[in-house]
Image (tube, rainbow, N blue to C red):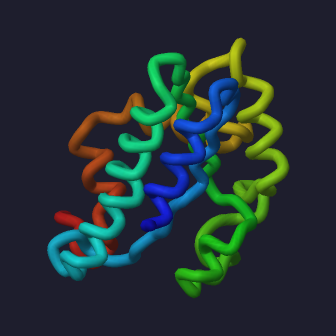
Amino acid sequence: MPAGSRVAACIAAEPDLALLVNNAGFGHCGLFWESDLAVLEAMHRLHVLAILGLTHQAGSAVTVQAVCPGYTHSEFHDLLGDDRRRLAPAFLWTTAAEVVDASLHAVGSGPLLVIPVWPHRWLIAVLTRLPFGLKLWLEAPRGHRPI
């Protein structure tokens, strides 16, 4: 039985399910159009279709919460082979415990979108107010930015 089917069966068998946490995921570096399609499809199956199936199985009483942790000390960046010091300054990094605490604090009474630490909340507040063209320029890889 595939892992997703086993999890779905466990969810269906639990009449008093109170919390379902999906922490599955992986990252991929590179430009979209240069990326291996099989990797992108696997990412889509895990990040989108698995969540769809599990929340459907959990039923109508599901409250969805999106946690946007930003830079978090975990194995995620280790598996990508990233050097954390080159990715972001130390003050932008948080711990998994801080992410979990912020998420649990918001369950049931707080926002459905949780951004655990203030530097990320500040960055989101600023970046979402930038003109679209400037955002595209900032997000483009340095070698592909138009002048």
Q: Residue at x 49, y 64 (%)?
A: 3
The C terminus is located in which quarter? bottom left
- Position above or below: 123 against 24: above
Question: x, y (%) of residue 115?
Answer: 63, 36
Is 126 located above or below residue 88 in the figure?
above
70 is higher (above) or lower (below) than 57: below
Q: Quadrant of residue 81?
A: bottom right
Q: Horizontal and vertical percent for residue 5?
A: 44, 56
Q: Quadrant of residue 56?
A: top left
At 36% from the left edge and 35% from the top edge, which residue is drawn? 130
Residue at screen point 23% across, 81% down: 36
* Residue 63, quarter of the rendered image: top right
Q: Is residue 115 left or right of residue 64?
A: right
Where residue 138 sits: x, y (%)? 35, 55
Which residue is more in the foreground, 46 or 76? 46
Q: Closer to the camera, 56 or 123?
A: 56
Q: Is residue 12 above or below residue 35?
A: above
The quarter of the image holding the N terminus is bottom left
- Toward the viewer: 140 or 6? 6
Q: Residue furthest bottom?
A: 81
Residue 126 position in % (x across, y down): 50, 34
Q: How many marks?
A: 0
Name the residue located 72 percent from the left edge and 68 percent from the top edge: 74
